[in-house]
Image: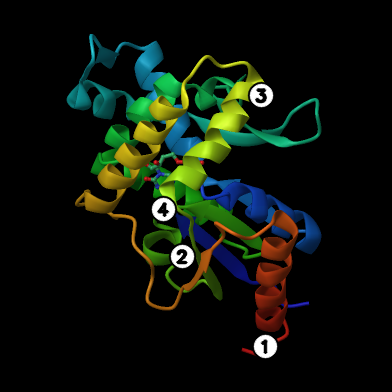
């Protein structure tokens, strides 16, 4: 069967990765969480004091980029997880500290260039579902299916707050809401590859949709494209 490329973009915490994983599992495609890659670079910057005393040392981080190796590898759980220089960082990249710095890091053109190159290689043979902010616009402008996900900021913050609480993180709803809105602001206004809906993307607002409806709606769109009906 013909393989296609599926690009899923959208605002913070819109549930892109949930539906992207469901689609990839169902279709037998590779799932790539491009946000995890920006988060891993952010973790590296924190660990190596390129972020220090609330300041980001861009030049030093850029000089160290060749030292950063990123890989999605199957962990003991059988799931593909993010490895930074050989270490599983799946959990470490989900902290509030990383969430607070990831959008500033993602404005750095040299960081984007490095990650986009890796993303191109991962999607080279199609049969890939990739989620992020610039997948339909910059990484795979020729993707056969582009989805742009949205939901109200309060709804999104509520979902992320619940996730963090379940993990045992001590955060307040207000902190999460502020982080979500601030990341949206930085992501949409940056100069290099800002978050915006590609002209040919299909917008889905899932504020009022359950996971099952959302999955089946998008799966149908994918099936139509695989079969060449669209
Ligand atoms: O928290 P959420 O799952 O919504 O975000 P993420 O997908 O983990 O992405 C974290 C951050 O990485 C975003 O807020 C963007 O600043 C950046 N990012 C990006 O610039 N381009 C991408 N393709 C993916 C993520």
Mark 2 → mark 1, Cα distance in angstroms: 19 Å
Location of residue 185 with respect to 90 vertically, above or below: below
Residue 28 x %, y %: 78, 59
Among numbered discs 1 and 4, the one appearing first in the sequence: 4
Label 1: which residue?
228
Mark 2 or 3, nearer chain start: 2
State the residue in front, 197 or 228.
197
Disc 3 + disc 1, Cβ < 8 Å:
no
Quarter that holds the N terminus: bottom right
Residue under numbered circle 4: 133
Q: Quadrant of residue 103?
A: top left
Q: Judging from the image, what secondary structure is the residue with disc 3 in?
A: helix
Q: Position of residue 43 (x, y in %)?
A: 43, 21
Tell me whether circle 2 and circle 4 mark residues in contact (CB < 8 Å): no
Mark 3 vs mark 1, foreground winner is: 3
Give the vertical position of 24 relative to 111 (above or below): below
Q: Position of residue 27 (x, y in %)?
A: 77, 63
* Residue 166: numbered disc: 3
- In whole angstroms, how far apart are the C-alphas of marks 3 and 1? 42 Å
The crowding category of the residue bearing disc 1, from other C-alpha atoms within 10 Å (few below 14, some 14 to 19, many at least 20), is: few
In-image side of 121 versus 178 (left or right):
right
User: Could you tell me if residue 37 is visible in this image?
Assistant: yes
Question: Of callouts 2 and 1, which one flags the residue occurring earlier in the amino acid sequence?
Answer: 2
User: What's the residue at 62%, 16% (across, down)?
Assistant: 168
Q: CA distance from mark 3 to mark 4?
A: 26 Å
The image's mark for residue 140 is: 2
Residue 68 appearing in the image: no
The first of marks 2 and 4 along the sequence is 4
């Amino acid at each position: 069967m013909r393989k296609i490329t599926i690009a899923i973009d959208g605002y913070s915490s819109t549930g892109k990765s949930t539906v992207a994983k469901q689609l990839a599992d169902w279709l037998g495609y590779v799932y790539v969480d491009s946000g995890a890659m920006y988060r891993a670079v952010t973790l590296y910057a924190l660990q190596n004091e390129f972020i220090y005393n609330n300041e980001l040392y861009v030049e030093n981080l850029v000089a160290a980029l060749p030292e950063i190796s990123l890989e999605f590898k199957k962990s003991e759980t059988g799931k593909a997880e993010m490895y930074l220089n050989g270490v599983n960082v799946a959990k470490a990249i989900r902290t509030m500290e990383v969430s607070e710095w990831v959008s500033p890091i993602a404005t750095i053109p040299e960081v984007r260039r490095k990650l986009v190159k890796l993303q191109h290689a991962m999607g080279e043979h199609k049969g890939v579902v990739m989620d992020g902010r610039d997948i339909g616009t910059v990484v795979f402008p020729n993707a056969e299916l582009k989805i742009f996900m949205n939901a109200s900021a309060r709804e999104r913050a509520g979902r992320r707050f619940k996730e963090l609480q379940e993990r045992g993180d001590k955060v307040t709803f207000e902190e999460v809401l502020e982080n979500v809105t601030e990341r949206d602001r930085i992501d949409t206004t940056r100069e290099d590859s800002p978050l915006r809906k590609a002209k040919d993307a299909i917008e889905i607002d899932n504020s009022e949709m359950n996971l099952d409806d959302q999955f089946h709606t998008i799966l149908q769109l994918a099936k139509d494209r695989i079969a060449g009906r669209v």
